[in-house]
Image: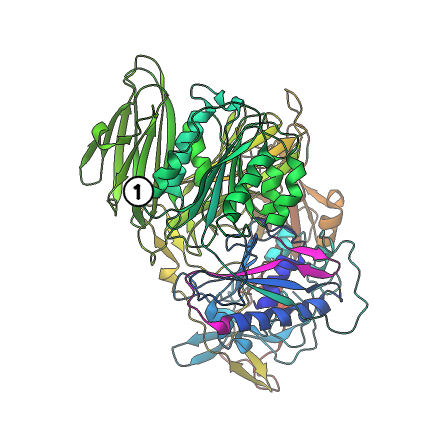
Amino acid sequence: MGWFLNAVLVLVMGLLLVVKGSMIQLNGNGYDGVVIAINPSVLEDEKLIQKTKEMVTEASTVLFHATNKRAYFRNVSILIPMTWTSKPKYLIPKLESYEQADVIIADPYLKYGNDPYTLQYGQCGEKGRYIHFTPNFLLGDNLNIYGSRGGMICSRNIAGVNRVLKCSNKSCAIKMCKTNRKTGLYEAKCQFIPEKSQSANASIMFMQSLDSVVEFCTEKTHNPEAPNLQNKMCNQRSIWEVIMDSDDFRNLSSVMREDSPPPPTFSLLKTQERIICLVLDKSGSMRLGSPIVRMTRMIETAKVYLIQIVEKGSWVGMVTFDNVAEIQNNLTQIIHENATQEIIRNLPKNAAGGTSICGGLKAGFQVITQSNRSTFGSEIVLLTDGEDYDISTCFNEVKESGAVIHTVALGPDAAQELEQLSIMTGGYRVTPTANMNDFIDAFSRIKSRSGNLFQQAIQLESKGLSLKPKEWMNGTVIVDSTVGNDTFFVITWTHNIPKICLQDPKGKEYHNADFSTDKDNSKAARLQIPDPAETGNWIYKLRNENGSPENVTLTVTTRAKSPVVLPVIATVHVNQSTGHFPSPMTIYAQVSQGFLPVLGVDVMAIIETESGLQETLELWDNGAGADTIKNDGIYSRYFTSYHENGRYSLKVRVQARNKTARLSMRSQQSRAMYVPGYVEDGKIKLNPPRPGVKNNEMEANLEDFNRITTGDSFIMSGVPSEPIPDKFPPGKITDLEAKFQANHILLSWTATGNDLDKGKADHYKIRMSQNSTILRNSFDKATPVDTSGLKPKEANSKETFKFKPENLKIENGTKVYIAIQAVDDANLISEVSNIAQAVKFIPPPVPSTEAPCPNNNGTGYNINLATIILAVVGTVATINIF
């Protein structure tokens, strides 16, 4: 898909906040705050900037007309990597960053893959994550293959022919498509080749390359029976209906102006060196906590952050505050250990006084400005446990500073407005609990947002136990081959240091004497492994040598071994920062290497309240329930186990064991539709064949690994007192499939739960009709199916059910639509599932060997696209447009 498809997916469909905090706003009819970021690994090329400008300018005009003069792009920022040469025209970014950009320009991870695509986590109408273009796509000549870069998205009326293309490196042989005699479907290799000249003007979301296609499908032109992801996820609604139901367009009127919008205004911003100021609370309440006071945990965590997490070359300062703020360190560049130790020496030792958060923030800004640096794009790491009713008094100053505020909220008394500082500036917000490793996990999230994965710290392990006297905590940490630089093992305790036994993959042992401890009554020991750490299993054994129970934790961090081989990373987030009962939270964890999804791993989310109540939730990549697409490396689940109001922390453990992990090299689901060629003047004219991945290269085995990653905390309100009532119905079934077996219909789907995707439903309601509209609009009026013998299984199980349609004459071509609802034990009912279609097909007699008659133009039979879409499941390229 060209620029327009992607832009529409992300910018048109209600995108005020992208998943990770986009700054896009629709003011009047113009979109402001669009950020396009170039990856640091992309070689410097001024043409890339110019091509990007041309693409956005063209897209703005196409968007304007496709939305009936409702919207266009007004202000766009292009973020230049720090690795490029500085120029006077490059400005300093404010809140813009690579990690939170709406569009990224980066090389594909492998030699294949210049197709643009949109990374989409959520359900129909929800916001996307980012659009990915490659430099080759922007700089190359792809107009015939993808169509105009500015006009890249299914209509009933697009005409063309069906053919099989067998291509070598230099040429392609064109053959007629064969039909499977048992199913009536075309063979899997069959491709649709459109007529170059069309009368259809919709839909941009499907056939973006045709000049006549300039509109979205509406309710009148949309094909609700097409077996694509749009119909499956959006209840057969057209893209225009989805767009007009979004927050942006619901009340947006057309602009009464000339035929074209004003051209976009572009700002060129260049990423700067990372500037961080720690703003740490040392008020009296920091003496609270058990068995270790908050002050001690803060000190130990700050050491880990400065030594192991902050990227080399960053500039770091520090402020402490109670009633008043005090500058402890001006900006110091972290290059050598001496610079780090200089800041560590000034960490606060005592806690007393009140809490002035605004005072701490203002002093943090001062640290930056008095070093002749701009607060634009700088970062403040604010840690506090105090209630401060005056935070809102400095909101305007925070906004004007252009600084990003990361907030670390400790305990239930931390100011409720604290997270608003992070939300308004695009910062992280974390809520560590009383455990020492939770503190380290929280600070490990606050990494550089430049997109340079080689610099970022990666957490391999985080484990803590309360050990009885002489009890051991044993385990294995895998250092995979993509990591191993700057590797640290950190052990903490509450009273006395445990006995430490650590063995590397070659058998070398490390003991207490090999670990370093600070002299200031520190409760932590640290071992730095020489670069690179040995690849393989590191076995640890820690024993409580104290006569009483001891809380012992182990944390392991590392960095990528090579800037060329990217490490596997995991990122996690929730669909909203605040929720009100009974609104569920959706938890997403993306596991990837480069831009390729990692499959077949165990992903566990750990959600914890401020009072320490913990819920462990397995996330699934099964294409059902909260998970949109199966096997895309995005593991998802609904969270409904609310215990109390307040903050909930979130982290995810990813484990690849027993050689089950796989790297998928399949094309992205929401990608551009590659056009193999066109029928023009009665002849098929082919485009150059697109390089592809061979079937035996679709997936590659990965070595075992483990990752720990922390997500933003979220706040819940309106949670009733125990017992909490059942307000969650079973989740919507989204993968219902149907097919005829003789005169029976066989159904299959993924079981939903009692509460969305948790537990198991009480029973199912299945209805059928020969009119899909009845199922979609009046489910209860459709013909019921006897399900008395169908007992729901546990959520995520595979369900099958066979029945014989009653009072229905079944003959060749009989078409039946089926949908399903799940009902729980409180009689709460799920949404109607996707509508499945079963067609009775009786194979015709074996055809003669005579060739089919060509039509008048010599290209074979003309065939309407609607026929192809209805007949060919899985062979027509479809675009994820929700």
Q: Quadrant of residue 869?
A: bottom right
Q: Position of residue 756 (x, y in %)?
A: 60, 36
**Of the pair 506 and 741, the residue shown nearer to us:** 506
Determine crowd level at label 1: few under 14, some 14-19, many 20+ residues with C-alpha closer than 10 A.
many
Please indicate whether residue 504 sits to the left or right of residue 828 in the image: left
| Residue type of the residue flagged with mark 1 | Thr
Residue lying farthest left?
507
- What's the magenta region? 23-48
Q: Residue at x 61, y 27 (%)?
A: 387
Q: Is residue 195 visible?
A: yes
Residue 694 lies in the magenta-colored region: no
Q: What quarter of the picture does the C terminus occupy? A: bottom right
**Of the pair 362 and 90, the residue shown nearer to us:** 362
Q: Quadrant of residue 657?
A: top left
Residue lying farthest top?
547
Q: Residue at x 57, y 52 (%)?
A: 95
Q: Residue at x 59, y 56 (%)?
A: 229
- Compared with 419, 186 (above or below) is below
Please indicate whether residue 780 sits to the left or right of residue 369 in the image: right
Q: Position of residue 747 (x, y in %)?
A: 57, 46
